[in-house]
Image (cartoon, rainbow, N blue to C red):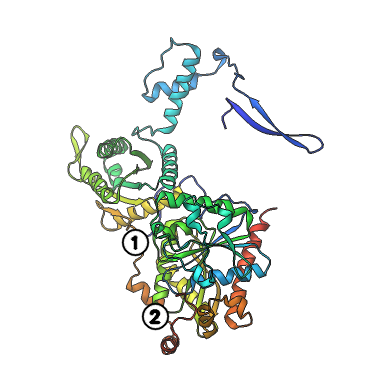
Amino acid sequence: MNAPVTPPTAPVTKPPVVFSPAFPTDPRRALVFAVTSGKGGVGKTFMSANTAAALAKRGLRVLVLDADLGLANLDVVLNLYPKTTLHDVFTGKAMLRDAILKAPGGFDVLLAGSGLVEYSRLTSEVRNQFQTVLHEVLLEYDVVILDTGAGISDVVLYAISLADEVMLVSTPEPTSLTDAYATVKVLAAQQGRRTIRVVINQTLQPGEGRMITTQLQRVVDRFVPALGSGPVVLSHMGDIPSDTLVRSAVQKRQLLFTSMPGSAPAQAIAAVAGRVGDLVQRWQAAKG
Amino acid sequence: MSLEGVVKCNARLRNNQSFPIVVNTSHTKRCVDVEALQLDSARRLIAQSGLPPLSEDQPPQAYVQSVIDSLCSLSSHDALTGLSNRRSFANAVEQELDRVARSGDVALLLMVDIDHFKKVNDTHGHLVGDTVLKLVAQRILACVRPMDSVSRFGGEEFAVVLPNCSHSFGHVVAERIRLAMAQSPVDATPSLQLSITVSVGGAYAQPWIRSESAIWIERADRQLYRAKHEGRNTVCMEPTIDTVVTTEEKELLFGSMNFDAYDARMAMANLDTTDGATP
């Protein structure tokens, strides 16, 4: 595994390997951002929804797409139980337009609905439907957030492969960090990802998240061999401090960012959204 | 875009108005004076390449076509072994990745490298080395299906693209190639038998995922280097999904972490278990 990687012959005629986006690079289209985590229950959907609200507040057109097709709970977080879901679009019972809802945070959302258990395996149908849907909305938004499922199943990996950027959410718990690290390994090895954005949720002390990301980076530098060009870089996007307000917002089915905007975690989310916003701006600036 | 048929383009007027026009190109035959073409060096190349000689008594257009076909064949094959060369290998890989991304099929890439080949050259000379390369190429070809493409990747390294090859089968093919060499020596000259072994590394393309050929090649190459590292005459396949986090990795990940904070967190977690997490 750790044998030196020095090819005997000159590298293949192509330029150095970097991750290449699934959709043509076009500054007019949305930046596709996958939010993922190795382990479930670390606040991935919470981050997707609240970051979307914070981005919407900055004036960006945001769509959150429930990419956790098998076991979605974005509807629970947003307290939205629509009659028309992605499921109806996939089965041809509804138009895509009719399945896109306005979420309380000022952003749009495309919910999977819970009837999508049959889509928890990646078939050619799921893949095609998914890509078609994404393709149709790309020009309508500045950011499309893919709220992926937990774990490293083929559906999750596929959804991430469609994204330009990945945000990996973890808590400081060793189990969560171990799974996050495994996710980094797979994304680097299979998709040639060079940059992975990291958010550490439920931190206890200031600076804890950055320290954790730094430590993760050390392990990556040591054990994750770089494919093609350059090393895998973990870019720290922020810490979300642990706060009982988060729990009460989740239980009341409210978006923390809108219901308690002054709280420490909401402000931390605003800071993360600021960094995502910068990435969107840089993406759009590629125009000229 | 083909120039034969119908082409749609946009015309722009001075006042910046634009309108679409359809151009029918199917009758725009460009005439070439076949007699005036300089074909001597092409003829020479083809004559010394071992390809079937060009038949001179055919209509001029058919003759030129056969010259072009022969040149295409020359530029996509390796002169020594007759296998596909690096250029057509790049094509094969690109095409296969495209297919895998659309169909979700499983495809395998094997990199095969002759062990201690330099020693063969140094001891017995380059002519013997060349013969060994040809014989290895033939044995690899005999181990795979007609639909698989075997190429000379460079030097003493070969690459095999196996479309539609399941995970349970890939290792068998790789092992078959290794054994085809290890089981019997090759006749380098009528009086010289050499025992030649190969190391094989393999990696599967990720179904559904649009990837880069360079990534796939490097993954297979990495397994080849693992096989070399493990003593050669070995097959190493990439583990299906490398999600295993080793003790070493965990040690580095958690070794220097401040577990006082973690203990405090655990104490708190008893009071408050789900903050930030979704149900």
> In the image, is A109 to the left or to the right of A124?
right
- Judge left or right: residue A237 versus residue B159: right
- Image position, residue A210 (x, y; %): 52, 77
- Chain ID of residue with mark 2: B
Identified at 34% across, 61% down, the residue is A1
Asked which quadrant contains residue B241, the reply is bottom left
What label does residue A1 carry, if any?
Answer: 1
Amino acid residing under circle 2: Gly
Question: Which chain is disc 1 placed on?
Answer: A
Residue A17 visible in the picture: no
- SS assignment at label 1: loop
User: Where is residue A197 shown, x and y percent of the image?
Assistant: 53, 67
Circle 2 sits on which residue?
Answer: B255
Q: Tell me the amino acid under the disc marked 1.
A: Met
Q: Please, is residue B272 above or below residue A226 in the view?
A: below
**Residue A257, numbered circle:** none
Question: Residue B194: x, y in percent?
Answer: 21, 41
Give the class, few, some or many, for how many residues have Cα within 10 Å of label 2's Cα (few <14, many ≥20).
Answer: few
Q: Is residue B221 visible?
A: yes
Left or right position of A251 against B240: right
Marks 1 and 2 close (CB-CB < 8 Å): no
Q: Is residue B89 above or below residue A75?
A: above
Q: Which residue sits at x=58%, y=14%?
A: B33
Near-viewer residue (B54 or A43): A43
Q: Secondary structure at mark 2?
A: helix
The residue lying toward the viewer, choosing from A85 and B271, is A85
Which residue shows up at 48% across the image and 11% down it?
B59
